Image (spheres, grey):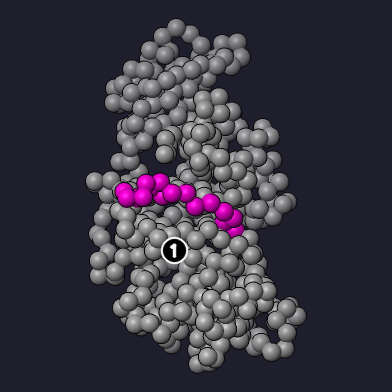
Amino acid sequence: MKPIRVGLLGLGVVGGGVWTVLAQNGGEIARRAGRRIEVAAVAVRDVAKARALVGPDVTVTTDGMALARDPDIDIIVELMGGDTVARDCILEAIAQGKHVVTANKALLAVHGNEIFAAAQARGVMVAFEAAVAGGIPIIKAIREGLTANRIQWLAGIINGTTNFILSEMRQRGLPFDAVLAEAQRLGYAEADPTFDIEGVDAAHKLTLLASLAFGIPVQFDKAYIEGISRLASEDIVHAERLGYRIKLLGITRRRPEGIELRVHPALVPDHCLLANVEGAMNAVLVRGDAVGPSLYYGQGAGALPTASAVVADLVDVTRLQMADPEHRVPHLAFQPDAMADIPVLPMADVRTCFYLRLRVDDRPGVLADLARVLSDAGISVGSMFQQPHGEHQADIIFLTHEAREGDVDQALRAIHGLPFVRSDVTRLRVENIT
């Protein structure tokens, strides 16, 4: 059979990794796919740099739309990033009847509903394994391996930059700013790390995972997002003293009243699997009603791990491109006419446990007043400890039982108005994930 001809949009870190994987493992990949997969053309900004990598036999252009319209290209692989030119090229490729492979989680989180609908109408595939957790095959696991299950929840460490920063802060006792600078020096963090450290990247990925797990439309605009930039080293120390580690988690959970969709730092018991995921590694813990908990762990970024996922999608598309579109695995795991209209819960209605830390005057009656405020808001304290701070002040830390987020917000507003409180209250969620 003639080879599958690929148009590659972008030849940066991941695009270069795809080229390398196809060159190194082309024979093995062809044995799995049933035919050779070759890059026929690339669209890049720097033509000379690309030509030095791909050689004279591959078309090199700056016009991604030309590849989308080229009748000799079978599959478009979009690795350029962004949500403008990439969106236009993908929609044009779909309109031309081409299958698409992409690693662009930001694009799919915002425009996924439009893209998947267009692909469904045209009878082509959009594969996106590389968009979530790099080389970990979590999309295929949820979409195919766990098909028999009603997914109850999933929780993931799905941003390697923040996990590296939190691991270094805990292990070396360094402040956030120092570890971020180190992460940038080592290449784990971008020059502008905002999407990573503020949780936006993780929220893009979680949005896609929630759609796959629960059969709901992509709804990035309804995700609650909180990053790690304001996390204090002392909270990491206190958490460890209490038997927890702090991780930036993406959590989506099925509740009777709706779906939780939230990204934020959380205390995780130190004996749990996710608590022991260190460095730049990723992991996703999924609980299904039949299989119970299953953990998916590996490298969530980097040239070759992400290229591994891209090429795996290329193999899947190659195998299935001639199959009846009605019998392919749906883009978001559920049949398009069976997507559920389940609401995403506002964060105020989410229930979890909380870690609260505040600095107060060290004098009689303080604990009683704080306990009364929490009790008035319907919040039950599970444990408390106090640590002196200077001569006349102390840090008080509460661990609560499960409480509604909106009630905790109400209590914190009341606490801020108390005359003996000398700091803002640090509020972190506690996730007893098993």
> What amino acid is labelled 1 in the image?
Lys
Using residue 190 as the reference point, say whether residue 103 is left or right of it.
left
Location of residue 173 (image quadrant): top right
Residue 127: % across, % down: 46, 71
| Quadrant where the C terminus is found in the figure | top left
Residue 22: % across, % down: 63, 76
Camera-side residue: 167 or 38?
Answer: 38
Camera-side residue: 149 or 112?
Answer: 149
Using the image, determine if residue 268 lies above or below residue 386: below
Q: Going 69% across and 89% down the picture, which residue do you hit?
A: 57
Using residue 317 as the reference point, say whether residue 176 is left or right of it.
right
Q: Going 32% across and 35% down the picture, which residue do you hit?
A: 404
Let me know if residue 77 appears in the view. Answer: no
Using the image, determine if residue 234 lies above or below residue 47: above
Q: Main secondary structure of the magenta part?
A: strand
Let me know if residue 163 appears in the view. Answer: yes
- Whether the magenta-drawn stretch holds residue 402 is answered as no
> SS at mark 1?
helix
Q: Which residues are magenta?
A: 286-301
Camera-side residue: 431 or 21?
Answer: 21
Camera-side residue: 6 or 367?
Answer: 6
Q: For mark 1, what is the residue?
A: 140
Residue 188: % across, % down: 66, 53
Residue 244: % across, % down: 51, 31
Location of residue 95 (image quadrant): bottom left
Using residue 122 as the reference point, say whether residue 341 is left or right of it.
left
- Whether the magenta-drawn stretch holds residue 290 is answered as yes
Using residue 369 as the reference point, say whether residue 60 is left or right of it.
right
Check the image and name the residue furthest to the top. 364
Number of marks drawn: 1
Q: Residues within 10 Å of mark 1 (few under 14, many from 20)?
A: some
Q: Going 52% across and 78% down the picture, which residue do you hit?
A: 33
